Amino acid sequence: MLKELSTGEQMGICGITIKVTTEQSSFPDEGTTINDEVESATACVADLEVLGVDKILILSHIGYTNDLEWLVNIPGVDVVIGGHSHSLLGGDDFEQLGFPTKGPYAEIINGTCVVSAWEYTRTVGALTVSFDENGVVTECAGATKIAINPDKYTVRDADPRFDLEAADAAIMTASLLGLPASPFRNVPADEDTITALSPFFEKVDEVRLEVIAQAPEPICHTYSEPDPICPDGVTQNWLSGGVCNLVSEGFLLNVPTADVAIQNRGGCRTDILQGDVTFGAVFDILPFSNTLVTFEMTGEQIRLLLEDSVNFFLDPVSVISNRVVPTGY
């Protein structure tokens, strides 16, 4: 993609996603080839340079470590804006909050300005890059900012039952904005945008807020960190919590002729809180448009599939190169 800058100059943008994850989760049609990330990025840069573009940005979704190890070593790459690994970049602004960071925002490495986007659109990156007359990066600076709504603070997940009262919300706002080198910003809502979106919000809320079940107790979902609502969070993490298990049970209820149901824990995204379970909460748990598929397998194939999954958790590289069964389940 080519973008014209305010100076009239052009910036070239190359989009790169991770090869293995795309192949294993999207299952491209037969005959579709997904090339190596570095080779593809290098080819894209070469195409742009032929057009005379000397300011080149790679928009990547291959993980912060791969950005640092692969992309900054490609001649001609000036800026990398990355994702996929959920890597928070910053300094004392986030360390004071107890948020572990993976590096500074932003940093010049091997002549390339590198930043990453953290996760779930929770932050906005403010990045300034300066170039010399030859298109070489001379300055790379910025910060990760978190926009706050001073009228609404939800203590736990997205459940309105835990919203702070107005007085407590005012105290929270003052505290967040008063932090040294605070990453938080209180930005007024754009009224024109709110007006345009309101009819859609109302229609979505009609469905999203519908109560469809009751949870007598919290059901944990854990991934890489202990879950604060789980008293035995560390153990639950190794067991993947209860949410994905419940999803698998739901599969069996929907396909009563099936004997086994398997759900990848990466496809489940959050806890089920005690009390009302809404339609929207279910979408938060299962945000991806996956399709329930049934097919026949032997017991040996099921055993290999489960062992393959465990092996991938322990040693992803060896499983990718020695895969014994397809993981399309």
Image: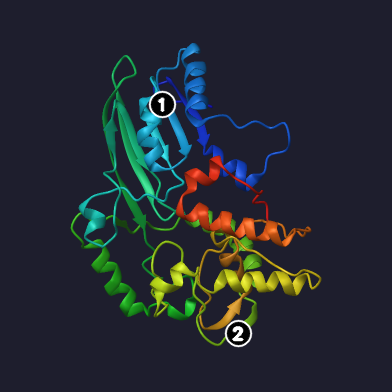
Picture coordinates of residue 183, whole percent (x, y): 28, 55
Q: Which residue is mark 2?
A: 214
Cα separation between marks 1 and 2: 55 Å
- Residue projecting furthest to the bottom: 216
Q: Amino acid at mark 2?
A: Gln
Q: Is residue 315 left or right of residue 252?
A: left
Q: Which residue appears at 25% of the width and 68% of the height?
A: 174
Q: Is residue 3 visible?
A: no
Quadrant of the rendered image containing residue 9: top left
Locate the C terminus and report the quarter of the image it occupies. Answer: bottom right
Locate the N terminus and report the quarter of the image it occupies. Answer: top right
**208 up-or-down from 191: above or below:** below
Circle 1 or circle 2, nearest the eye? 2
Q: Which residue appears at 52% of the width and 33% of the height?
A: 15
Q: Which mark is residue 328?
A: none
**319 up-or-down from 242: above or below:** above
Q: Sort mark 2 into few (<14), some (14-19) or many (20+) by Cα contacts within 10 Å.
A: few
Quadrant of the rendered image containing residue 152: bottom left
Q: Is residue 221 visible?
A: yes
Q: Is residue 234 left or right of residue 323?
A: left
Task: Say which element carries label 1.
Answer: loop
Q: Which residue is mark 1?
A: 6
Q: Amino acid at mark 1?
A: Ser
Please report whichever mark, 1 or 2, sits nearer to the chain's N-terminal start. 1
Picture coordinates of residue 278, whole percent (x, y): 61, 76
Is label 1 in contact with label 2 (beta carbons under 8 Å)? no
In this view of the protein, which residue sits in the foreground, 111 or 232? 232
Q: Is residue 266 left or right of residue 164?
A: right
